[in-house]
Amino acid sequence: MFDYFLNGIVASFSPVTFLTMLMGVVGGIVIGCLPGMTGSMGLVLMMPLLYYLQPSDALLTLAGIMCGSMYGGSISAILISTPGTPSAAATMLDGYPLTRQGKAGKALGIAVVSSAAGGIFSSLALLLIAPALAEVAMSFHAHEYFSLSIFGLTIMAGASGKNLVKGLAAGWTGLFLSTVGVDGNMGLSRFTFDIPNLMGGINILPVLIGVFALSQIFENGEAIQKPHEIIDQDLRDVWPTFADMKRIALSLAIGCVVGTFIGIIPGTGGAIACFLSYDLARKLHRNGDKFGTGLIEGIAAPESSNNATTGGALVPMLTLGIPGDVMTAVMLGALMLIGVRPGPLLFTEQPEAVYTLLAGMFVIQFVILAIGMGACRVSPLLLRVPPALLNPAIVVFSVVGSYTLGNNLFDVWLTFFFGIAGYFMRKFDFPGAPMVLGLILGPMAEDHLNRALLVSRNDWSTFVTRPISGFFIGLSVLSIAFSFLAYGKGKSKSASGGGKSAA
């Protein structure tokens, strides 16, 4: 194994291979930071070119796009409060407030270091314990998926900001929206209003673009007559200091472990991992109530988690032939095109190809680190672009991203609908993150609940008696209790503070 890995490192630095890998990373970052342009879209666009590349070059190009797009989404999330990918929605919660404080360079630096750290950790796990991690993934069945989704839904309280009631209302709205479409259990249409385009449900991408991107554009439109506000950004120290690394060490560890673990579970994805990491880091931080105001720990946790899911998602794909998320599903098809067949025999039948990919995953993280650090000093210039030019460009990218999702104009109208809804949510202080969470986790919870009850013959006790499922149910109870206790403490502090000021 060690010899194959060394050969893979050497192959990664051959001129043609390194150049194609570099192009994949740069393309992934650019695609990731554009609203609506997901990493899976980048992989699809690359597939026609795979026939002209050697298998090792094609593998590393695909991996570069996958990892680069995960980091790229944080750039627009931090700078303009518009997450380029669903995984960057959690990064926006603390990244954009730092930009408003003139610390965009610091936020971008923390993001790229955290993303590289998560990628290195998951690549190391993929290299050393891939078979063991694959067994963990195979132990997840309907009961475990449902319990995991319930645990994920408890994050809604943590993502609600200062107003728990409004956050929960937004989350329940997302859960309601997730019921639109055909019921997978009974085959009945629900809330489709005889609109064929709603039969498949509401896709997350139009909601994400509308609630976070277009709503921000509509809000900016109110101030279009005012002078353009340029916030001076401190770009001298984009590299995290030793003190910064000490501060984010716990958040990095949480993001790396949670991202890798969630990544190996098929059907989950980076968005769930990032919000889980963010919420867990907030709960374990001594100043957790300040998350959302511009803490670098709030960037480190989701950013290390989103790139950690890439290595984790490759575990079931390479060892079992089961894609862990949408991007690895596209990547699985691309591997088939170049003659690489993932599965239990891959490591023995094609060791050169697979270990070149594993070695290249390490190299890719350092490429992301180098490119990202260079971008930290350049990308904040985007903030100096007048809104009259920037806002139309974002709208164009949003429309194109929504349309290319299914080549359907209905998705564009849906994006504008949620953009208007998101605008009013901003006006009345309803957070958008809980609604996105509800829409992501709702179908997962419902589908696996139905399957689990069918298997257990409506025996609800199996959710507690099965070890892994019971573990997540217990975490859910603790998470809910912690959230309400923290909310109660916050209310009492504000009440006591108000009383003192009144006195």
Image (spheres, rainbow, N blue to C red):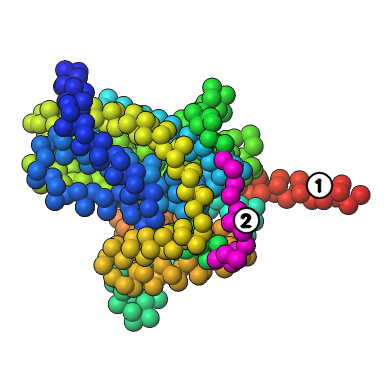
Main SS class of the magenta portion in the image: loop
Q: Residue at x 36, y 57 (%)?
A: 36
Is residue 117 inside the magenta stretch?
A: no
**In front: 299, or 271?**
299
Question: Neighbour class for label 2 at 10 Å: few (<14), some, many (≥20)?
Answer: some
Q: Amino acid at mark 2?
A: Leu
Question: Neighbour class for label 1 at 10 Å: few (<14), some, many (≥20)?
Answer: few
Q: Which residues are magenta?
A: 221-233
| Spot occupied by residue 123 in the image (x, y as percentages of width and height) | 30, 30
Identify residue for label 2: 164
| Spot occupied by residue 67 in the image (x, y as percentages of width and height) | 31, 40
Which one is closest to the eye, mark 1 or mark 2? 1
In this rendering, the answer to whether 451 lies above or below 290 is below
CA distance separating discs 1 and 2: 19 Å
**Secondary structure of the residue carrying numbered label 2:** helix
Q: Is residue 1 left or right of residue 472?
A: left
Q: Residue at x 45, y 71 (%)?
A: 417
| Spot occupied by residue 224 in the image (x, y as percentages of width and height) | 57, 64
Mark 1 or mark 2: name the one nearer the start of the chain: 2
**In front: 450, or 33?**
33
Q: Is residue 496 left or right of residue 146?
A: right
**Secondary structure of the residue carrying numbered label 1:** helix
Q: Amino acid at mark 1?
A: Gly
Q: Residue at x 41, y 67 (%)?
A: 415
